[in-house]
Image (spheres, rainbow, N blue to C red):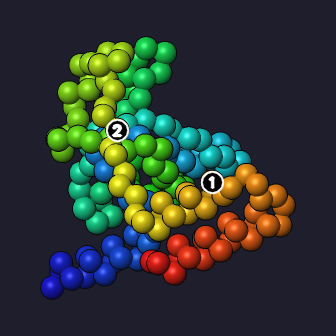
Amino acid sequence: MSQKIMELVEKTSMKKDVAHFEIGDTVNVHCRIIEGDKERIQVFTGVVIARSGSGTREMFTVRRIVQGEGVERKFPLHSPRVAKIEVARSARVRRAKLYFLRDRVGKATRLVQRQVVKSEAALKAEAADKAPKKLRGKARTKAKAAAAAAAAKAE
């Protein structure tokens, strides 16, 4: 019974639109910082090396190198202090926790980038962007629009 009550209470404080990111992704975390009566946004960019918890208690750890020194910061996923999370790039990893990056220096900290498989619609949209150079002005715009409509129809 108390577990159900806790879930109801937690649902009210959870964010509905949380960005999807995984371990190894390089993310930009936009943090709200309050100084006196002013509020500003500060961006912390780094690699996600860990995720833990669940529900409102879910946390993630971001690591970056500042002036040759490793800096790690833990963020609550559903905190109002975290304005938004953007994924800059994704990496292919085979571990749940990337604590081994703490011991590495320089180029050894790089992770292999994950290859994204594009759908046929995305490939057609790219082809529309590369419309023939012969078309100029309105004709080229119409050709792009027709290709985009065909790609949307294919989905």
Give the side of residue 2 with respect to residue 90, left or right.
Answer: left
**In the image, residue 45 lies at what x, y percent?**
48, 37
> Most extreme residue toward the front, as rendered?
134
**In the image, residue 84 lies at what x, y percent?**
52, 55
Q: In the rendered image, is residue 78 in sight?
A: no
Q: Mark 1 falls on what kind of element?
A: loop
Residue density around tag 2, few if under 14, some if 14–19, many if 20 or more, within 10 Å:
few
* Residue position marked by numbered label 1 in the rendering: 130
Q: Is residue 110 above or below residue 15?
A: above
Residue located 68% across and 71% down the image: 145
Q: Is residue 1 above or below residue 43?
A: below
Is 26 or 35 nearer to us in this picture?
26
Q: Quadrant of the C terminus?
A: bottom left
> Most extreme residue toward the right, as rendered?
137
Residue located 29% across and 19% down the image: 108
* Residue position marked by numbered label 2 in the rendering: 113
Q: Mark 2 falls on what kind of element?
A: loop
What is the C-alpha distance between the residues marked 2 and 1?
26 Å
